[in-house]
Amino acid sequence: MTLNNSPVYNNGQGGIVNDGGTVTLNNSPVSGNTASSEGGSIYIYAGTVTLNKSPVSGNTPDQCSPVAC
């Protein structure tokens, strides 16, 4: 999946979930997303996510791995 100039924001069940394959965000910020189960902004089960001029900020995750919140 490729997003071009498409903000991902204010989603109540998380922003992006990748369960395999390739996700590319071009000029597509990820912000204001929350999660009640896995995720918050970007959750990767498998595959890759590439961010090009796509900041990730202001999200409320329910778990932070591998980095602490």
Image (cartoon, rainbow, N blue to C red):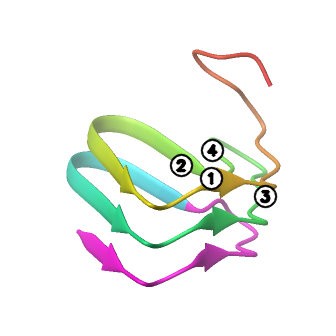
State the separation of the CA atoms marked 4 and 3.
Answer: 8 Å
Q: Are marks 4 and 1 in contact (CB under 8 Å)?
A: no
From the image, tell me which residue sits under label 3: 34
The 10 Å Cα crowd at callout 4, few under 14, some 14 to 19, many 20 or more, is: many
Residue 19 shown left or right of residue 57 in the figure: left
Q: Nearer the viewer, residue 48 or 17?
A: 48
Residue 18 shown left or right of residue 57 in the figure: left
Farthest-out residue, bottom: 5
Q: Which mark is residue 39?
A: 4
From the image, tell me which residue sits under label 2: 42
Q: Are marks 2 and 3 in contact (CB under 8 Å)?
A: no
**Which residue type does callout 2 highlight?**
Ile
> Which residues fall within the magenta stretch?
1-15
- Residue 55, x across and y down, in percent: 58, 56
**Which residue type does callout 3 highlight?**
Thr
Q: What residue is drawn where x is 78% and y is 51%?
A: 36
Label 2 or label 3, whichever comes before in sequence order: 3
Q: What residue is drawn where x is 59% and y is 62%?
A: 15
From the image, tell me which residue sits under label 1: 56
Q: Nearer the viewer, residue 15 or 53?
A: 53
Which of the two discs, 4 and 1, sits closer to the camera? Answer: 1
State the separation of the CA atoms marked 1 and 3.
Answer: 13 Å
